[in-house]
């Protein structure tokens, strides 16, 4: 069994090496150069990227089911819990994650059931210390 595993790993490594060779040939064929670019993250986030709890669009289309699911989660499972709960909203940029969060945050049922609500903007380059301080 151990010998078969080693043979399979060896074959995979050979395939990977061949693929790297093909990539190198293509790079040379198209006269591409090797370079390493270090992208520095700014310490301050561009002002236009920062969000708030205010809903910019008066009516949001196509997210009612998502909104209801999150509101039900907040009202049924989180409201009386002694523990911190997190509901992750993930997706590609521009699909409406922030807008969905804003709509949920401003929902009357949520406002009526939670005495305190806060909106924290978390940027791509974030500091846990800064986030905790803002909270």
Image (cartoon, rainbow, N blue to C red):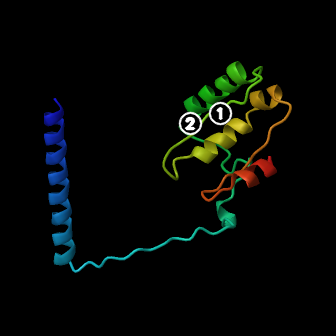
Numbered label attached to residue 108: none
Mark 2: few/some/many CA within 10 Å (<14, 14-19, 20+): few
Residue bearing mark 1: 86
Left or right of 132? Residue 72 is left
Give left or right: position of 55 versus 28: right
For residue 84, above or below residue 121: above
Q: Residue at horizontal 57%, vertical 39%?
A: 89
**Element on which disc 1 rests:** loop
At which x and y percent is residue 92?
48, 49
Q: Position of residue 128 (x, y in %)?
A: 70, 51
Q: Residue 100: horizontal and vertical position, in percent?
A: 62, 41
Q: Of marks 1 and 2, which one's residue comes earlier in the chain?
A: 2
Q: Nearer the viewer, residue 31 or 87?
A: 31
Residue occupying image coordinates x 57% and y 32%: 66
Graded by Cα atoms within 10 Å as few (under 14), some (14 to 19) or many (20 or more), the crowding at tag 1 reads few
Q: Residue furthest right?
A: 115
Q: Which residue is mark 2?
A: 63
Under circle 2, the secondary element is loop
- Residue at 75% x, 55% y is 130
Q: Quadrant of residue 1?
A: top left
Mark 1–mark 2 CB contact (< 8 Å): no
Q: CA distance from mark 1 to mark 2?
A: 19 Å
Residue 16 picture quarter: bottom left
Q: Is residue 133 left or right of residue 93?
A: right
Q: Residue at x 62, y 33 (%)?
A: 87
Q: Nearer the viewer, residue 96 or 41?
A: 41
Residue nearer the viewer, 73 or 39: 39
């Amino acid at each position: 069994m151990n010998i078969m595993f080693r043979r399979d790993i060896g074959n995979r490594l050979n395939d990977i090496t061949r693929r790297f060779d093909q990539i190198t040939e293509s790079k040379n064929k198209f006269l591409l150069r090797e370079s390493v670019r270090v992208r520095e993250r700014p310490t301050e986030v561009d002002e236009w990227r920062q969000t708030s709890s205010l809903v910019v669009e008066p009516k949001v289309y196509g997210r009612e089911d998502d909104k209801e699911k999150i509101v039900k989660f907040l009202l049924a499972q989180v409201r009386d819990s002694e523990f911190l709960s997190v509901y992750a909203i993930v997706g590609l940029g521009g699909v409406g994650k922030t807008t969905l969060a804003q709509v949920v945050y401003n929902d009357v049922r949520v406002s009526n059931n939670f005495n305190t609500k806060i909106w924290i903007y978390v940027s791509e380059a974030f500091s846990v210390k800064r986030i905790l301080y803002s909270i």
